[in-house]
Amino acid sequence: MQEKAQGQSILSMNSIEVLYDNVMLAIKGVSVQVPKGGMVALLGSNGAGKSTTLKAISGLLKAERGHISRGEIKFDGTDITEMLAQKRVEMGICHVIEGRRVFEHLTPDENLTAAAPMGMSRSELSVEKDKIYDYFPRLAERRNSQAGYLSGGEQQMLAIGRALVTQPSLLMLDEPSLGLAPFLVAEIFGILQKINREEGLSVLLVEQNALAALEIVSEGYLIENGRVVMHGTAEALKSNSDIQEFYLGGGEGANFHNVKHYSRRKRWLS
Amino acid sequence: MDWVFLSELAINGALTGLLYSLFAIGLVLVYKASSVPNLAQGGLTMVGAYVVLALARDLGMPLWLAIPLAAVVMFGLGFGIERVALRRLAGRPVVMILMLTLGLDIFLRGTTLAIWGGTSRSMELGVSYEPLFLGDIFISRIHLVGAGVALALFVAFMVFFRTRTGIKLRAIADDYMASWSVGISVERGVGLSWALASVVAVAAGVIWGEIQGVDQALSLLLLKGLTVAVLGGLDSILGAIVAGIILGVIENVGAEFLDPLVGGGSRELIVAAVLILTVMIRPHGLFGRHDIERV
Ligand SMILES: Nc1ncnc2c1ncn2[C@@H]1O[C@H](COP(=O)(O)OP(=O)(O)O)[C@@H](O)[C@H]1O
Ligand SMILES: [Mg+2]
């Protein structure tokens, strides 16, 4: 696959290493590019380093006593490697963390308000909310109930809506499909695709559910043991026999053990 | 039993209870915005009273100026506490933060002792001690004033927690990580909650200082304040008001009956019993938020 030029990438992450507690090396030189207006998936099994990669980009590592020990991350041409998480949100990076952590004791409407930038006027916020309720009509119906009592799908929609209020240009989602029925996953992914098309929002999607993810993204990375072992277009990944075997309905939950093998694969894929 | 006497006990109990509420609102503010129980509220209340006195007596300012100025000073102190002490502990086990606030309380008490000594000073608000009569019922004016202040703060904070800033504070209490993820400044939010609690401490310090004098004993209000906050449900301002009234009435009426039986001192027993029973029977208090079972 042709590597996009730096200038067209909204996000460019180069050889990032992350340490937790100064000892645990969680990712070992991960490079990921997200083209402007593109949708990219990060695939891989449990513990591969997908969430860590997103936290490195959003700056949430610090809250878990992690830090970037090598490499650099550029967002829209600016080096953000050392930037505070809050600053990154202001710049347009928003991270929907795993486990759809909505503010449970707030209503959906208050969840959206909570995420509003301080500088956003009342009228801008209400326009923004209307737009989000248009994308997620289920949320509109329950806007004044307690968020903790929404269904899993509704909570995931709220978590995405809440992120949209921050007006991101790059939206990162950590396993939004986890624990949701297939029809809900399809609904949510469909809406993501729609927002991507209509507003040019760039999306970086972390998924274990490769089958669903590869339907909506244009390219994907496969991460194993803290390294990128494969990178290609969605088409190429879908037709790859190993991906098919392990991720697309083959042995469910199977792990990649032979990383070398996939490094070799990577060579002919790229 | 004489009904007039009983209503007098109940009404004055309710008024005293609202003064406990005044104190408890400070505890609730911090809990509502950071899920941390603030054991330093007694120390803050005492310092609030001392700062007012320092400005009014030592610097000779009129009280109408000294009180708002003390509120500003305490607002800054609240922010400072977050910046210097609490920030390091964000995300650590709550028990560590609990210990920190307890340490802070002791520190504040020691500081006032070192600067102003242990002799009780009077606030001299100038509220008349002439009793007020409601029909045949005797009511203390200062208690009435304090109850009014508590209710005014209650209304102000009910409104505040519906503003955007207030909603962000409630969001922080719900989930630090999720708050960070959408760009909420958790540190500043926690700082603001301590700053507001410190302002409430000035109000409580002035009223309670007028009633019982300004000395280190003011910090012991924590026990009753905590009981009220727990009974109300640690994160509910409305709960603090209702629970204050309930505790005040039970305490005042109950002591009247129990004191002759146990030979005095039953007030403390009643307060302790309410605290213990609440935690055992209804840990969320009357209006506290429940933890929601994940679906
Ligand atoms: N807060 C943390 N502290 C220490 N180690 C962590 C922490 N979070 C993740 N790890 C470790 O880093 C590795 C990658 O984890 P993670 O990024 O969560 O993987 P994934 O999201 O792909 O399941 C795992 O070995 C995990 O145990
Ligand atoms: Mg993960």
Image (spheres, coloured by chain):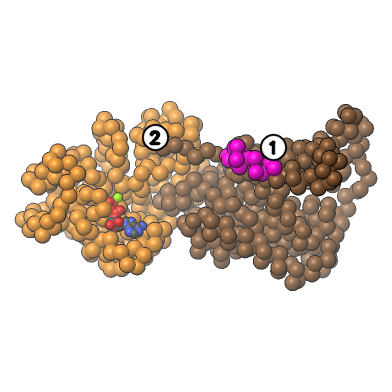
Instruction: List x then y, in percent, for residue B230.
Output: 63, 44
Q: Residues within 10 Å of mark 2 (few under 14, many from 20)?
A: few
- Residue type at tag 1: Val
Secondary structure under the numbered disc 1 in the rendered image:
helix
Quadrant in the picture for residue A245:
top left
Question: Badge 1 sits on which subunit?
Answer: B
Give me the residue at 23% from left, 45% from top.
Answer: A208
Determine if the magenta segment contains residue B284.
yes
Quadrant in the picture for residue B243:
top right
Q: Nearer the viewer, residue A195 or B232?
A: B232
Give me the residue at 82% from left, 43% from top.
Answer: B262
Q: Nearer the viewer, residue A212 or A44?
A: A44
Which residue is labeled 1 in the image?
B242
Determine if the magenta segment contains residue B194.
no
- Tint applied to chain B in the drawing: brown
- Residue type at tag 2: Val
Q: Is residue B94 left or right of residue B25?
A: left
| Relative height, residue B30 to residue A106 (above, below) | below
Give me the residue at 70% from left, 46% from top.
Answer: B272
Q: Which residues are magenta?
A: B273-285
Q: Nearer the viewer, residue B98 or A13?
A: B98
Closer to the chain start, of discs 2 and 1, is: 1
Q: Quadrant of ligand 1?
A: bottom left
Q: Residues within 10 Å of mark 1 (few under 14, many from 20)?
A: many
| Residue contact at pointers 2 and 1, CB within 8 angstroms | no
Main SS type for the magenta part? helix
* Residue B295 disc label: 2
Q: Nearer the viewer, residue A157 or B246?
A: B246
